[in-house]
Amino acid sequence: MKNGTFQEYLVVPDATCGTESGIKASPQYFFSACAAGELRMFILGEQEQEIANASQVLNWMTSEFGTYTKDLKYYMEEQYAVSDYLIQQMNIATGDGFFGVIFKVNTSNGDEVSVLVSNVSEGIRNVVDCFGSCSDESRDCAERWVMATPPYAECTCQGDDCRMNVWPMIGEE
């Protein structure tokens, strides 16, 4: 990746494990929620394409910043009172010292939640959560990346009853 360029990636589990498909994480790497499954990774943008060896590429990406799953866990427990959830999809933005993840998770009580975590500076991260509703009922109030320099987050339907909550997280991930 060239200095000063940013890229967005989509990470999903393959369908090998059916309803058990999902993404789990340790502090330093992501892996399939079931032993038989694998993760799939796609470059998003003008020319979308699948990346071979998704797990190796993810491990390389998270080697500097971690997976942000401690921040996700803390936020899910504090904001949603949920500690049992499974990551279903991740949208990762990275490049030139920036790393951020939009986690889309299913909770044990059947709710679908999305939360964004990104680095701000050394030891400081933001957790971003868009909540509420859109006036266009076909849209969800959720986070999305704007691939600028550097990338930033916005809610999918600004100006409606969709609001952004930003929590700073300080310390090691």
Image: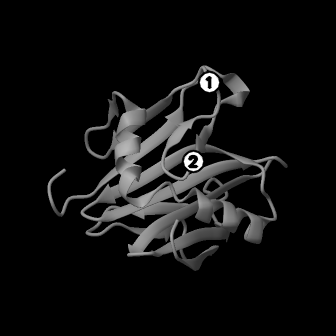
Above or below, 46 relative to 97: above
Q: Position of residue 140 (x, y in %)?
A: 62, 58
Task: Give the quadrant of residue 130.
Answer: bottom right
Residue drawn at 60 percent across, 65 percent down:
71
In the depicted structure, whether residue 17 falls above or below residue 133: above
Could you tell me residue 61's position as x and y percent? 36, 49
What crowding class fits label 2: few (fewer than 14 Cα within 10 Å), some (14-19), or many (20 or more)?
few
Q: Which mark is residue 26?
A: 2
Disc 1/disc 2 C-alpha distance (Å) = 15 Å
Question: Circle 2 — which element?
Answer: loop
Please give the label number shown on residue 120: none
Residue at figure coordinates x 57%, y 24% from the top left? 37
Please give the residue where the numbered disc 1 appears in the rendered image: 35
Q: Residue at x 67, y 58 (%)?
A: 137
Alpha-carbon neighbours of circle 1 within 10 Å: few (<14), some, or many (≥20)?
Answer: few
Disc on the earlier residue, 1 or 2 = 2
Look at the image and tell me whether residue 33 can be seen.
yes
| Total marks in image | 2
Residue placed farthest to the right in the image? 109
> The disc labelled 2 sits on which kind of residue?
Ser
Residue type at numbered disc 1: Ala
Q: Relative to residue 112, is residue 35 drawn left or right?
A: left
Q: Which residue is at a point 76% across and 65% down the rendered structure image?
A: 77
Element type where label 1 sits in the image = loop
